[in-house]
């Protein structure tokens, strides 16, 4: 090999490594405050998401808040008080749907919280205004709805498929509809930070069971971002093992249905586009034996080479 060819090879290797490092550079940091579905009130769906190296978090659902912050402090993710994280670091809440395991932390912690925005689609917002923050179930800490509005929270209704700035952050969000025991609605949130994205799905059943095209429409919308590697990961629920009958899914996914949906996404994005792609599994329902079974089934059925992430409460990771 000539000196010129050696130099050329070195240059190509350096360039490739630099490109790979750039491609893998994290855009988001995530702190799970709660990761489960079901009965553990100290560990229900809530994920803090912020641009990397900032403290400008948005809370994706809010089933558990205070207990999750305390866990993160124990793990030295935060070096301030629980109150400081709640009041200063969390800039707002994106609520996918109004089931209690996704909103109870928001409600209970509202007296100690600071002023910020709560984002939800119309039906979800109506549920929260009429049934939770209504001066009967709980004081109305919002700026709309029934009772006496205390105006701590700004209730902002999201329009479907419309990009909305997330106040006091550099991020934006676009909402997509999901079916969760049709016709009950849930929501997927596509969060943008610069040129990069993260996708969070609230509870959802598979299209085949829900008699819906909501997931296929969502995959169609995000497929270009998967192909261009701008989408850094997808938060998606798997609540039950494969043995759960369809009639008892109640708008949730199994490993079988997760992989069916991921194959649809790959068909739309292109062959091998999901190899090494990060899938964050949420909403695992107890008991522990079911969670173990779900993890085994996903591992055995992961024929796309997905990078499966099981978040742990209070432990930070990056996308």
Image (cartoon, grey):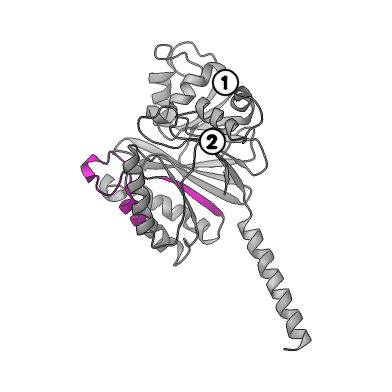
Labels 1 & 2 near each other (Cβ < 8 A): no
| Any part of residue 22 in sight | yes
Q: Nearer the viewer, mark 1 or mark 2?
A: 2
Q: In terms of image quadrants, where is residue 248?
A: top left
Q: Can you identify the residue that label 1 sits on? A: 113
Residue 118 location, x and y as percent? 52, 28
x, y percent for residue 165:
59, 38
Q: Relative to 304, is 23 on the left or the right?
A: right
Please check the rendered image and state whether residue 28 is part of the magenta-colored stretch, yes or no.
Answer: no
**Side of 78 relative to 307 (left or right):** right
In this view of the protein, can residue 143 be seen by the observer? no
Find the distance from the CA under tag 1 to the CA under tag 2: 19 Å
Q: Position of residue 293 (x, y in %)?
A: 32, 48
Q: Please state which of residues 159 and 308 is positioned toward the viewer in this rendering.
A: 308
Magenta range: 231-260
Question: Percent position (x, y) of residue 181?
Answer: 29, 38
Q: Which residue is mark 2?
A: 314
Tell whether 229 sits left or right of 274: right
Q: Residues within 10 Å of mark 2 (few under 14, many from 20)?
A: many
Mark 1 residue crowding within 10 angstroms, few (<14) / some (14–19) / many (20+): many
Earlier along the polypeptide chain: callout 1 or callout 2? Answer: 1
């Amino acid at each position: 090999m000539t000196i010129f060819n050696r130099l050329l090879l070195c240059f190509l290797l350096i360039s490739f490594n630099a490109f790979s490092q750039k491609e893998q550079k994290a855009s988001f940091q995530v702190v799970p405050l709660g990761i489960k579905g079901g009965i553990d009130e100290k560990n229900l769906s809530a994920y803090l998401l912020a641009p990397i190296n900032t403290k400008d978090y948005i809370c994706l659902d809010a089933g558990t808040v205070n207990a999750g912050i305390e866990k993160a402090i124990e793990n030295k993710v935060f070096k301030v008080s629980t109150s400081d994280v709640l009041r200063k670091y969390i800039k707002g809440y994106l609520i996918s749907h109004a089931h209690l395991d996704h909103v109870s932390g928001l409600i209970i912690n509202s007296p100690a919280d600071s002023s910020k925005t709560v984002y939800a689609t119309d039906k979800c917002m109506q549920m929260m205004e009429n049934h939770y923050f209504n001066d009967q179930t709980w004081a109305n800490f919002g700026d709309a709805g029934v009772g006496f509005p205390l105006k701590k929270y700004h209730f902002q209704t999201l329009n479907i498929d419309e990009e909305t700035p997330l106040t006091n952050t550099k991020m934006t969000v676009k909402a997509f509809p999901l079916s969760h025991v049709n016709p009950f609605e849930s929501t997927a949130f596509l969060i943008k930070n610069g040129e990069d994205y993260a996708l969070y799905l609230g509870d959802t059943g598979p299209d085949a069971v829900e008699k819906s095209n909501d997931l296929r429409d969502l995959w169609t919308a995000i497929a270009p971002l998967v192909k261009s590697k701008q989408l850094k990961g997808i938060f998606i629920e798997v609540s039950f093992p494969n043995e759960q009958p369809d009639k008892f899914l109640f708008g949730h996914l199994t490993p079988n249905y997760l992989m069916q949906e991921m194959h649809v996404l790959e068909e739309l994005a292109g062959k091998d586009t999901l190899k090494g792609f990060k899938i964050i599994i949420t909403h695992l329902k107890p008991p522990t034996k079911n969670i173990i079974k779900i993890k085994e089934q996903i591992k055995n059925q992961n024929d796309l080479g997905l990078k499966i992430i099981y978040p742990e409460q209070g432990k930070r990771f990056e996308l």
